[in-house]
Amino acid sequence: MKLLLLWRTLSVGGLLGLIAWIILWNGWLTPIQHMPRWLELLILLAPLLYLVRGILHGRISSSVHAILISLIYATLGVWYAASPLEQLYGYLMLALSAALYLGSFMSAKVLGKQAKETSS
């Protein structure tokens, strides 16, 4: 049970951290803005906001979706890290998406194992 709490905390921390970091960077800190802020925030936050309720309630299906969605943000993190002006944004996005991935993967694994044991 303690292990599940650890993985869920990592998953929630990665998800909420990504949301906060995207809002903070694109809302206030960004040195370069190529498209309207509202559109960039909408595009970047929509997949994450889709996950919030399920991750907070510990649903296996949301954890699986979070695994897939976190890979998109990891790719974006690498993309932004390659730009000298947005390296900090990219590195932190990469770290938070890795936390979301690892936490969601391990949470789904532990929850799946528990569900299998209870059905037997």
Image: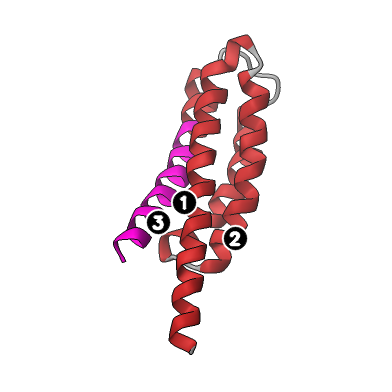
Element on which disc 1 rests: helix
Residue pictured at 58% horizontal, 67% vertical? 61
Say which amino acid is labelled 2: Val
Identify the residue at the far top of this view.
Answer: 84
Say which amino acid is labelled 3: Arg
First in residue order: circle 2 vs circle 1: 2
Q: Position of residue 62 (x, y in %)?
A: 55, 62
Residue 8's disc is 3
Element on which disc 2 rests: helix
- Mark 2 highlights which residue? 64
Q: Is residue 96 visible?
A: yes
Is residue 6 depicted above or below 111 in this figure? Answer: above
Between 108 and 25, which is closer to the camera in this rendering? 108
Residue span colored magenta: 1-21
Q: Position of residue 67 (x, y in %)?
A: 59, 52
- Mark 1 highlights which residue? 103
Q: Position of residue 3 (x, y in %)?
A: 34, 59
Q: Position of residue 75 (x, y in %)?
A: 67, 34
